[in-house]
Image (cartoon, rainbow, N blue to C red):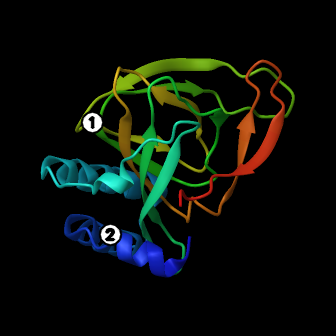
């Protein structure tokens, strides 16, 4: 996916305005906790507008979850994605290596959080599971605390708006085998 394509997809007026707001928040030099809380408030307001994501950017893939770029900042300081899981789909247990805020646009997302391991090859400890529905927004991760697994929790696809402190479509990240603690590196590629 080229930057030109990403720019075209960011032409959803509400998303373009939200991206400008996030850009301004980052420019303030806020610490990660303050920044993610501010982005959480702004994403809650965005979802409350009832804006429309075009159908091609909320379409599930029959094989795996997908992330469609809604905005990727030119300097890679943040990205906004439409993340879609079909019924029965989920992610591996993974981390993000950056901060992130997730709001649910449609459907139900189930998130299981894990304690971030302090050393490799130690089984992961689950810390709890939550279900998130339309309009709900959570800080999913910070650089220091970011291990979870998410899946579609209902009988319709779940669509989330994900905001990350990097270009999530190019950022190398960790996935974990929760039973052994084994780490594998992967990159979530943008859907085409």
Q: Is residue 53 left or right of residue 28?
A: left
Residue at the extreme front of the image, as rendered: 62
Task: Report which residue position mark 1 lands on.
Answer: 136
Image point 52% across, 47% down: which residue?
A: 66
Q: Quadrant of the N terminus?
A: bottom right
Name the mark on residue 19: 2
- Return the x and y of residue 90 as percentages of the image width and height: 55, 30
Lower position in the chain sequence, tag 2 or tag 1: 2
Image point 64% across, 42% down: which residue?
A: 95
Q: Is residue 34 left or right of residue 148?
A: left
Crowding at dot 1, Cα within 10 Å, few <14 / some 14-19 / many 20+, comes out as: some
Q: Nearer the viewer, residue 14 or 156?
A: 156
Q: Is residue 119 left or right of residue 139?
A: right
| 159 in relation to 13, above or below | above
Query: Can you tell which quarter of the image residue 24 is in?
Result: bottom left
- Return the x and y of residue 134 as percentages of the image width and height: 24, 35
Name the mark on residue 90: none
Image point 83% across, 21% down: which residue?
A: 180
- Return the x and y of residue 103 as percentages of the image width and height: 33, 43
Q: In the structure shown, which secondary structural element does the residue marked by tag 2 occupy?
A: helix
Q: Nearer the viewer, residue 5 or 113?
A: 5
Q: How far apart, in angstroms, are the residues tagged by discs 2 and 1?
A: 19 Å
Query: Can you tell which quarter of the image residue 54 is in?
Result: bottom left
Q: How many marks?
A: 2
Q: In the structure shown, which secondary structural element does the residue marked by tag 1 occupy?
A: loop
Image point 50% across, 23% down: which residue?
A: 88
Crowding at dot 2, Cα within 10 Å, few <14 / some 14-19 / many 20+, comes out as: many
Q: Is residue 53 visible?
A: yes
């Amino acid at each position: 996916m080229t930057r030109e394509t990403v720019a075209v997809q960011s032409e959803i007026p509400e998303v373009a305005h939200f991206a400008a707001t996030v850009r301004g928040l980052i420019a303030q030099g806020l610490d990660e906790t303050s920044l993610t809380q501010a982005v959480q408030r702004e994403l809650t307001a965005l979802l409350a507008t009832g804006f429309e994501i075009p159908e091609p950017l909320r379409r599930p893939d029959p094989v795996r979850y997908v992330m469609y770029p809604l905005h990727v900042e030119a300097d890679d300081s943040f990205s906004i994605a439409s993340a879609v899981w079909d019924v029965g789909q989920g992610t591996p247990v993974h981390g993000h290596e950056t901060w992130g805020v997730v709001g649910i646009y449609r459907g139900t997302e189930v998130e299981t959080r894990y304690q971030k391991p302090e050393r490799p090859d130690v089984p992961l400890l689950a810390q709890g599971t939550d279900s998130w529905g339309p309009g709900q927004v959570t800080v999913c991760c910070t650089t220091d605390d970011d291990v979870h697994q998410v899946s579609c929790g209902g009988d319709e696809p779940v669509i989330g708006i994900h905001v990350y402190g990097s270009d999530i479509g190019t950022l190398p990240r960790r996935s974990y085998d929760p039973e052994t603690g084994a780490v594998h590196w992967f990159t979530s590629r943008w859907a085409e």
